[in-house]
């Protein structure tokens, strides 16, 4: 267990990435942009309220600000992490240093995991550094500290899933550009296809079961982290008109434990919610992709193949 926390690949990459002033300036710039967006939203909302003769700070205003900040953070993860992770292994291959890295005592899984975490580190640092900005919503009420903690846990799970796709493409393709393009294609195609397929399955179920009074959640929705995010935001807003409910096309009865729920993994969704089930599904897929990536990178399987052929050839000669 100790070697996973003392990963030389991760430690070396972090020292290279984090010791420059460029990293500090980019963090400051990102936080300044987030703060400016929050300020503009609040200023515009206050002017709108005062125009109609009311300047009371409402709970809905805080929820709207919380949703905006949450979506921006989510987009940051989806857009930046594939670009960071897709070149982690293919970049080593282009520099012809991958073979030297594989000759070290580190296992292929430790190398892949270290490369992925180091590539994700900057984006995760940006995400964690923005936590104080979310404290602005406490001025309005409606969001508890535990809600923000839950949201950032979901961010970490989403980053892990997206990063595993990037590292998988980096292992499959030799060129960084090809791996990066493939990672973006896979991620955005997965998001669009799951939405369309889930919506089609939902409409088919509604057509065949017009008198069903429960909630039907199609399995493809569990593969889309955007659905998990919107469901989490809708649940944290009290299940009353949250954006997650609009996306899923269901009512606030979804959060009532007494309402029947059906569809793929409905037994899990009844206990964990849609976002919790979504987190479990994408985590399992991410682990499988990491294991496959480590197996592909591992050079021993090639050596074993050549070794078995050589032994069979020697046996035939004798």
Image (cartoon, grey):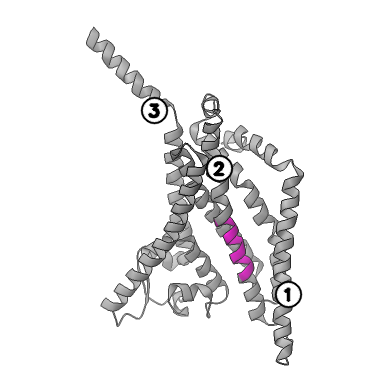
Work out whether residue 219 or residue 1 is closer to the camera in this orientation and state it.
219
Residues at badges 3 and 1 in contact (C-beta under 8 Å)?
Answer: no
Q: Which residue is mark 2?
A: 116
Residue 33 painted magenta: no
On the image, the x and y values in percent for residue 167 come to: 50, 43
Circle 3 sits on which residue? 301
Residue 156 is left or right of residue 170, and the answer is right
Picture coordinates of residue 265, whole percent (x, y): 37, 62
Q: Rounded to the nearest whole Å, what is the CA distance between mark 2 and mark 3? A: 22 Å
Q: Tell me which segment is drawn in magenta.
A: 68-78
**Lower position in the chain sequence, tag 3 or tag 1:** 1
- Magenta part, dominant SS: helix
Q: Is residue 126 left or right of residue 167?
A: right
Label 3's element?
helix
Q: CA distance from mark 1 to mark 2?
A: 37 Å
Residue sitting at x 52%, y 24%: 103
Q: Quadrant of the N terminus?
A: top right
Residue displayed at 53% across by 65% down: 229
Vertically, is 214 above or below 182? below
**From where the camera sits, is residue 218 visible?**
no
Residue 65 on image: x %, y %: 65, 73
- Residue carrying label 1: 139
Structural crowding at the residue carrying mark 1, measured as other residues with C-alpha within 10 Å and reported as few (<14), some (14–19) or many (≥20): few
In this picture, is 95 found above or below 83?
A: above
Residue, x 48% and y 43% (percent of image)?
A: 179
Secondary-structure class at tag 1: helix
Q: Nearer the viewer, mark 3 or mark 1?
A: 3
The x, y position of residue 186, in whole percent, is 44, 52
């Amino acid at each position: 267990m100790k070697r996973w926390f003392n990963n030389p690949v991760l430690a070396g990459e972090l020292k290279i990435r984090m010791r420059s002033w460029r990293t500090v300036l980019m963090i400051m710039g990102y936080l300044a942009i987030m703060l400016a967006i929050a300020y503009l939203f609040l200023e515009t909302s206050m002017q709108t309220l005062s125009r109609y003769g009311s300047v009371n700070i409402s709970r809905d205003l805080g929820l709207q600000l919380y949703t905006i900040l949450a979506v921006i953070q989510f987009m940051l993860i989806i857009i930046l992490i594939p670009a960071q992770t897709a070149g982690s292994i293919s970049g080593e291959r282009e520099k012809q240093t991958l073979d030297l890295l594989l000759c070290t005592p580190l296992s292929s899984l430790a190398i892949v995991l270290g490369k992925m975490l180091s590539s994700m580190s900057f984006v995760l640092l940006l995400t964690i550094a923005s936590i104080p900005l979310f404290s602005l919503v406490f001025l309005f009420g409606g969001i508890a500290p535990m809600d923000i903690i839950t949201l950032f846990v979901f961010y970490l799970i989403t980053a892990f899933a997206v990063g595993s796709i990037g590292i998988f493409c980096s292992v499959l393709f030799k060129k960084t550009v090809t791996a990066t393009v493939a990672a973006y294609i896979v991620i955005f195609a997965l998001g669009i296809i799951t939405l369309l397929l889930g919506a089609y399955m939902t409409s088919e179920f509604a057509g065949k079961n017009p008198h069903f009074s429960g909630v039907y959640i199609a399995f493809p929705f569990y593969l889309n982290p955007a659905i998990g995010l919107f469901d989490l935001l809708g649940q944290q807003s009290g299940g009353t008109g949250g954006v997650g409910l609009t996306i899923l096309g269901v009512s606030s009865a979804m959060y009532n434990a007494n309402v029947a729920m059906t569809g793929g993994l409905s037994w899990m969704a009844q206990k964990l919610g849609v976002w919790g089930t979504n987190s479990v599904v994408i985590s399992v897929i991410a682990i499988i992709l990491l294991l496959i990536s480590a197996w592909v990178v591992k050079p021993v399987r090639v050596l074993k193949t050549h070794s078995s052929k050589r032994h069979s050839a020697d046996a035939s000669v004798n």
